Structure formats: C-alpha cells, structure tokens
Amino acid sequence: MKDNIDEIPSGGVGIKIIGKIADELSYTPTSDGRNCLFLVKYYQQPKLAPPRDSSKAGFFKRASDVLNRFNGFQQQRNPQSDPRSNQQTQEFSLQLNTDIKAVAQVLSWLEQLDPLPIPEAVLHQCKLAVVEGFTNAVRHAHKNLPRETPIELEITVFNERLEIKIWDRGKPFDFQAKLQEKLLEKSPFS
C-alpha cells in the first residue's frame, strides 16, 4: 500500500463501488460544518424452519399455514415494511485522523461485525463500502486539510439492515451528480 495520498490513483472507482453496494445512498452537509455519507444495506436474516408437526393438520390449519407463508414472503420482498427490520441491535463508532494508513485501524474495527447475524456477502460488501468511504474522505474531501482533521465512522446494525455514516469536513459537492457520472462511465468493473 502506498503511504502518500497523492500517489494513490483516483478515478472514481470508490464511488462506483459504494453506489453499487448501497440500497439507499446520500451525501449531505450538516449544520455543524460536516458532510455525512449515509448508506443503507438491507438483508434478510437466515430464518430457521419451524418444527414440523407430526400429526395431520386439518384443512384450516394447512390453509392458515399457506397464508402465513405467503404473508412472510410478501414481507421478505419488502423488508422496510417489516417492523422487525427497525429494531436496532448494535451501534459502533470510530473517529480517526486524516491518514491513509488508518485503513488498518478501520479494518480492525470492522471485525466486531463478524459474529453478528449478518449474511456473509452483505458483511463483506459493507466492509468494502466503509473502507472506500474512508479512503475517499482522506483522498478527496480532506486532501488539503491538516492530518489532525477527524473522520468519523458509525455503523448501526438493525435486524435486517445496516446503516453506515461517514462524516468528513471537506468542501461539500453534488454527490448524486458525481455518482451518476461515475456509474455511466465505462470501466472494467461495469
């Protein structure tokens, strides 16, 4: 890994990756002079199969089971409508200086997500998004700011989604326009 921020190639790969990972994404200036990159990733927790009833179920019991399964399927298709997805289970935060070498600290901090009941693919995508968001803050938002300028990371885990917030203190820009521009460009990741 290169130690000098100026030597790290840029080109919008990080913003493309974040844009493809996130189910919801925004970048908003806050009233206290910071900017917040906010992304949400939805997932389904693995569901355990209910124990099988060895006795023969009656017609109404079987019909009720079918309807309940259909209702569960509908909720699965739209996790935002399920009140269980709104139950917060954990919150993690970290503040770092503007230093590209702090990526090692970010990766170590992210390890506390490993034992949580988050699907492995979602976990890896979200870790990648946090690292990309942090490095973008270092390389772009804080490019001309002192090394002591803090970058704050927060991950909130809910039953069926992750919310990631990354605060920087750089000059705000039109994130949605930049994201659209980068997603429309041809790249080996397309």
Image (cartoon, helix red, strand yellow):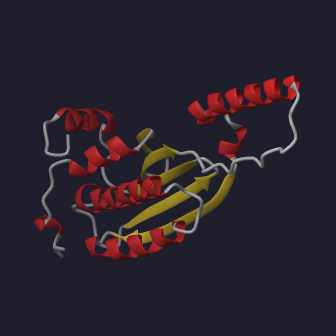
Q: Quadrant of the C terminus?
A: top left
Q: Is residue 170 or residue 14 the one in the foreground? A: 14
Q: Is residue 177 or residue 89 the one in the foreground? A: 89
For residue 10, side relative to residue 138 (left or right): left
Q: Residue 182, located in which quarter of the rendered image?
A: top left
In the depicted structure, whether residue 145 falls above or below residue 182: below
In the depicted structure, whether residue 66 falls above or below residue 1: above
In the depicted structure, whether residue 104 falls above or below residue 69: below
Q: Quadrant of the N terminus?
A: bottom left
For residue 107, side relative to residue 57 (left or right): left
Give x and y (percent) for residue 98. Answer: 32, 69
Q: Residue 62, located in which quarter of the rendered image?
A: top right
Q: Determine the residue positioned at 35% across, 58% down.
A: 128
In the depicted structure, whether residue 187 falls above or below residue 167: above
Q: Residue 116, located in which quarter of the rendered image?
A: bottom right
Q: Is residue 104 or residue 113 the one in the foreground? A: 113
Q: Determine the residue positioned at 64% across, 50% down.
A: 159
Q: Determine the residue positioned at 29% across, 61% down.
A: 135
Q: Determine the residue positioned at 70% across, 43% down.
A: 84
Q: Is residue 59 or residue 137 the one in the foreground? A: 59
Give x and y (percent) for residue 33. Answer: 43, 52
